[in-house]
Image (cartoon, rainbow, N blue to C red):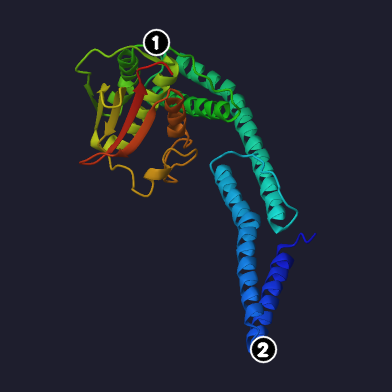
């Protein structure tokens, strides 16, 4: 009948006021029975109004709050059913429209990133290939050789960034899958250290690798994805911990959690406390001067989470940043 909440509240308030006035009038006339009946009716009406307010206002607002948190958490495009054609219903329509608009914007952004990344791969492949070919020319010397080496390294770095962006778009549109098999996680970590070893030596950094004290069981995992995680963590250790000139890497069993624990610690300045809660968010870089896309740790977190594991990031005692990867030893 009345769809406007203001009108409904106004009518309820007028009704209670009328009952109160009748009660006061009855008391002044010494109609105590009537006055008592009016007080009882007024109390009953207050209870009804409170129940109505809870059902029509408080409960819908709580649902809208929870729904807004889902959108803020990345569930764009979600829709909440409208229960009534009042102000709360109008707010529901606006939030649904906002959710749809954000989802469309996010989809357009993902499609744009994917398209640009694919377009960049071809010229980068050509640049990397020709730079590598020219670098093998024995006639190339001095500054020319150093210049070609720089071109090759920077092209490889850009190729890595493009691959990260492509992985990000696969996560966004649901094409990100794992190929699970039983793997030797220690061998995968050592392979990543071997792959990145030369680059770390060129950066003047030493790796202190601590092997497990016991034989580790085979665990279920995607070897390519997990190696991607290890390489990314080592890359971060070089970029953000180069001042310490040392990276500690260890692997072992966490018997309390029944998981394999991999730890990568640098001896750099560490992460500011206000940045720690955000380092795994997509595109968060912490500093405008930081190199990269800002999605490396977000991608690592996605991979580890899909393995049923945990990615923990914090500052180590004595300085530097410590990243810990926990992976279950049982089938996902």
Task: Establish if 173 lies above or below 330.
Answer: below
Where residue 311 sits: x, y (%)?
38, 31
On residue 274, the disc is none
Q: Residue at x 46, y 14 (%)?
A: 180
Q: Residue at x 57, y 52 (%)?
A: 62
Where residue 160 sits: x, y (%)?
47, 26
Question: Label 1: how many residues lie within 10 Å, few (<14), some (14-19) or many (20+)?
Answer: some
Q: Give the Cα distance between marks 2 and 1.
A: 90 Å
Q: Quadrant of residue 169?
A: top right
Q: Residue at x 28, y 24 (%)?
A: 201
Where residue 76 sits: x, y (%)?
62, 39
Q: Quadrant of residue 139?
A: top left
Total marks shown come to 2
On residue 29, the disc is 2
Which element carries disc 2, helix, strand or loop?
Answer: loop
Quadrant of the rendering where the C terminus is positioned: top left
Where residue 170 sits: x, y (%)?
57, 26
Q: Earlier in the sequence, mark 2 or mark 1?
A: 2
Residue ID for mark 1: 182
Foreground residue among 51 and 36: 36
Foreground residue among 147 and 196: 196
Foreground residue among 329 and 226: 329
């Amino acid at each position: 009948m009345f769809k406007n909440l203001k009108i409904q509240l106004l009518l309820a308030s007028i009704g209670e006021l009328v009952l109160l006035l009748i009660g006061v009038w009855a008391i002044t006339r010494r109609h105590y029975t009537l006055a008592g009946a009016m007080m009882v009716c007024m109390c009953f009406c207050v209870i009804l109004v409170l129940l109505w307010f809870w059902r029509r206002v408080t409960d819908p607002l709580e649902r809208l709050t929870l729904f807004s948190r889902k959108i803020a958490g990345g569930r764009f495009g979600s829709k909440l059913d409208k229960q009534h054609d009042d102000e709360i219903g109008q707010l529901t329509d606006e939030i649904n429209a906002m959710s749809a608009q954000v989802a469309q914007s996010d989809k357009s952004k993902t499609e744009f990133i994917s398209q640009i990344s694919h377009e960049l791969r071809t010229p980068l492949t050509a640049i990397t290939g020709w730079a590598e070919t020219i670098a093998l020319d024995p006639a190339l010397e001095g500054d020319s050789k150093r210049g070609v080496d720089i071109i090759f390294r920077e092209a490889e770095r850009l190729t890595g960034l493009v691959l990260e962006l492509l992985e990000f778009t696969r996560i966004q549109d649901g094409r990100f899958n794992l190929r699970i098999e039983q793997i030797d996680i220690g061998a995968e970590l050592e392979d990543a250290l071997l792959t990145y070893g030369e680059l770390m030596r060129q950066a003047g950094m030493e790796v202190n690798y601590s092997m497990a004290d016991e034989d580790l069981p085979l665990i279920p995992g995607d070897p390519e994805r997990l190696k991607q995680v290890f390489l990314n963590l080592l890359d971060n250790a070089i970029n953000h911990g180069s001042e310490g000139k040392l990276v500690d890497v260890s692997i072992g069993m966490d018997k309390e959690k029944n998981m394999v624990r991999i730890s990568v610690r640098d001896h750099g300045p560490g992460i500011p406390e206000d940045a720690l809660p955000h380092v795994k968010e997509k595109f968060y870089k912490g500093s405008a001067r930081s190199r990269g896309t800002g999605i490396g740790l977000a991608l690592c977190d996605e991979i580890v989470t899909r393995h049923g594991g945990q990615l923990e990031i914090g500052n180590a005692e004595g300085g530097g940043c410590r990243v810990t990867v926990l992976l279950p030893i049982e089938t996902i």
